[in-house]
Image: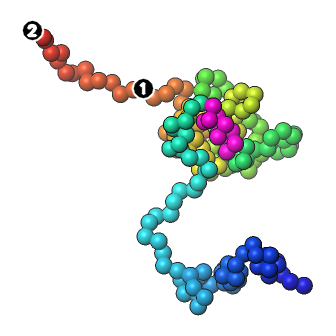
């Protein structure tokens, strides 16, 4: 019987080079070359984890497009279950909403720990039924906060988390003397 790698190669889904790289990785050899020499390291720092949000494009988009895009990303990446009953170990996690009231999600201990450690965050998003809250990975929360800062409700060490109003616009220098005309 053929193994899975051979079946995938035979079907044309992977190349022989990809199979060889997978075998080297399994054997614990660096994937740089067939001889097992390490690959050259890239000169740039590793990129931050991607959320799937094109932040630059969303900043220019209209509300409807922002809502739809964020809803799709949240549906794809959310960590808390949709529907169903929580286990007996689940606990209420309270957080401030953008209106200043108290929101609550019932979370399993593992999710509670991820939020506390800063690996996950609670965000608001526009569901098909109105504003809703959920738990997403930190990368999604960071990108969402760039587009809709008030939607970031809980995120450890993030300056936008829990805001009740947009930050005030910079004020003009009040020490300047007005000019007199005439």
**Farthest residue, direction top:** 182
Establish if 67 lies above or below 108.
Answer: above
> On the rendered structure, is 150 left or right of 16?
left
Of helix, strand and loop, which mostly describes the magenta segment? helix
Q: What residue appears at the point 71 percent right and 27 percent down from the top-left corner?
A: 130
Q: Residue at x 46, y 64 (%)?
A: 45
Residue 99: image x %, image y %? 61, 22
Looking at the image, which residue is at 55% across and 26% down?
A: 164
Q: Earlier in the sequence, mark 2 or mark 1?
A: 1
Q: Which residue is mark 1?
A: 168
Mark pair 2, 1: CA separation: 35 Å
Q: Quadrant of the C terminus?
A: top left
User: Do the numbered discs 2 and 1 sit on residues whose CB atoms are within 8 Å?
Assistant: no
The colour style of the image is rainbow
Residue with the mark numbered 2: 182
Residue 105 appears anywhere in the view: yes
Which residues are the magenta region?
A: 64-74
Nearer to me, 83 or 92: 83
Specify the label residue 83 is tagged with. Answer: none
């Amino acid at each position: 019987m053929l193994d899975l790698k051979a079946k995938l190669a035979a079907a044309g889904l992977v190349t022989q080079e990809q199979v060889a790289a997978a075998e080297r990785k399994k054997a614990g050899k660096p994937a740089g070359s067939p001889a097992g020499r390490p690959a050259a390291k890239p000169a740039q720092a590793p990129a931050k984890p991607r959320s799937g949000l094109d932040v630059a494009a969303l900043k220019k988009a209209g509300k409807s497009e922002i809502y739809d895009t964020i809803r799709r990303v949240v549906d794809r990446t959310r960590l808390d279950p949709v529907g169903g009953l929580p286990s007996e170990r689940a606990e209420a996690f309270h957080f401030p909403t953008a209106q200043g009231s108290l929101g609550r999600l019932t979370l399993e201990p593992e999710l509670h720990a991820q939020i506390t450690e800063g690996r996950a965050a609670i965000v608001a998003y526009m569901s098909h039924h109105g504003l809703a809250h959920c738990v997403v990975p930190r990368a999604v929360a960071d990108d969402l906060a760039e587009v809709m800062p008030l939607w970031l409700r809980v995120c450890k060490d993030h300056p936008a988390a829990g805001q009740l109003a947009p930050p005030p616009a910079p004020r003009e220098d009040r020490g300047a003397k007005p000019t007199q005309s005439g």
